[in-house]
């Protein structure tokens, strides 16, 4: 399995600002995913990030709000832009290791005030 | 569209008692099935998975799950729960190789397990 780290682990941000979350993997992976877990709810896929191509966003998520970078095979960032309290969530990145198995980072707990 | 239902939001069991967490799915074909556990402040850890073959699969930490095609279910079980099992458990489904593969997972809403000492 892959070892995944995320930075920051948590943050409290002001409404209208942006936060960039980093995801680092200890091995090269093709596919990386970004999920959102709103309080008391399940995980919702935001986008799939493949190195060398534009991220693919799920319905309800747009690039202007959640721009993603994938500069290499071990790193990705997710930016939450122009934040509102509704963006308060845990954001998790994941990678595909063994075929069809996903491994998750520890998450970034974001609170927007 | 695919969906996953975990009907129990909260479950409380005594330490040493048996556990069963329910998961039902709606999918066009037999999907790949997963159970994840999320401890407080942690990411998700894969407990076990079903791809094909034997419908009873063993996972880590003494967990097992049984795939029942006729009931579209993939319930998680443990014969004797430990206090450290207190966590949130998520069932997830993904497309199998027979339906084109891919790695997009759909998660259930989770079951919060509390263990009484």
Image (spheres, coloured by chain):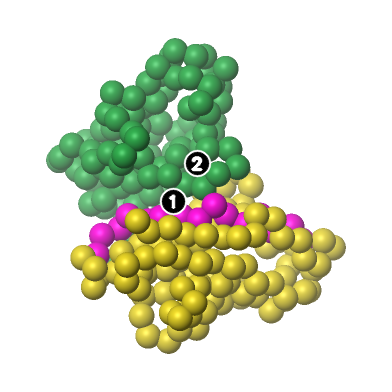
Q: Tell which chain the image draws in green.
A: A
Q: Is residue A85 above or below residue A60?
A: above
| Residue B112 in magenta stretch | yes
Say which of A63 and A78 sits in front. Answer: A63
Q: Residues within 10 Å of mark 2 (few under 14, many from 20)?
A: some
* Residue B57 visible from this viewpoint: no
List x then y, in percent, for residue B47.
Answer: 52, 66
Q: Is residue A29 above or below residue A68?
A: below
Based on the displayed image, in which of its 4 quarters is residue A36 positioned?
Answer: top left
As measured in the structure, the alpha-carbon distance from the residue carrying label 2 to the one carrying label 1 is 13 Å
Q: Which region is colored magenta?
A: B101-115
Q: Colour of chain B?
A: yellow
Q: Residue at x 53, y 22 (%)?
A: A85
Q: Which residue is mark 2?
A: A37
Mark 2 belongs to which subunit?
A: A
List x then y, in percent, for residue A111.
Answer: 56, 25
Say which of B83 and A25 sits in front. Answer: B83
Q: Which residue is mark 1?
A: A104
Q: Residue at x 38, y 34 (%)?
A: A22
| Residue B12 in magenta stretch | no
List x then y, in percent, for residue B5.
Answer: 52, 60
């Amino acid at each position: 399995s892959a070892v995944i780290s995320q930075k920051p682990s948590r943050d409290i941000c002001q409404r209208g600002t942006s936060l960039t979350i980093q995801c680092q993997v200890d091995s090269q992976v093709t596919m990386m995913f970004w999920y959102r877990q709103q309080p008391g709810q399940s995980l919702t896929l935001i986008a799939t990030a493949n190195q060398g191509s534009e991220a693919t966003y799920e319905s309800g998520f747009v690039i202007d709000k959640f721009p993603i970078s994938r500069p290499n095979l071990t790193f990705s960032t997710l930016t939450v832009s122009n934040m509102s309290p509704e963006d308060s969530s845990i954001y998790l990145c994941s990678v595909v290791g063994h075929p069809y198995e996903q491994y998750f980072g520890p998450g970034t707990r974001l609170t927007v005030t | 569209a695919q969906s996953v239902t975990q009907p129990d939001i909260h479950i409380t069991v005594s330490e040493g008692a048996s556990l069963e967490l329910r998961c039902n799915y709606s999918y066009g074909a037999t999907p790949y099935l997963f159970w994840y556990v999320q401890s407080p402040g942690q990411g998700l850890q894969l407990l076990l998975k079903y791809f094909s073959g034997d419908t009873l699969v063993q996972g880590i930490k003494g967990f097992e799950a049984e795939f029942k095609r006729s009931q579209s279910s993939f319930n998680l079980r443990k014969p004797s729960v430990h206090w450290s099992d207190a966590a949130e458990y998520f069932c997830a489904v993904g497309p199998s190789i027979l339906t084109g593969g891919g790695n997009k997972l759909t998660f259930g809403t989770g079951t919060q397990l509390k263990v009484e000492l």
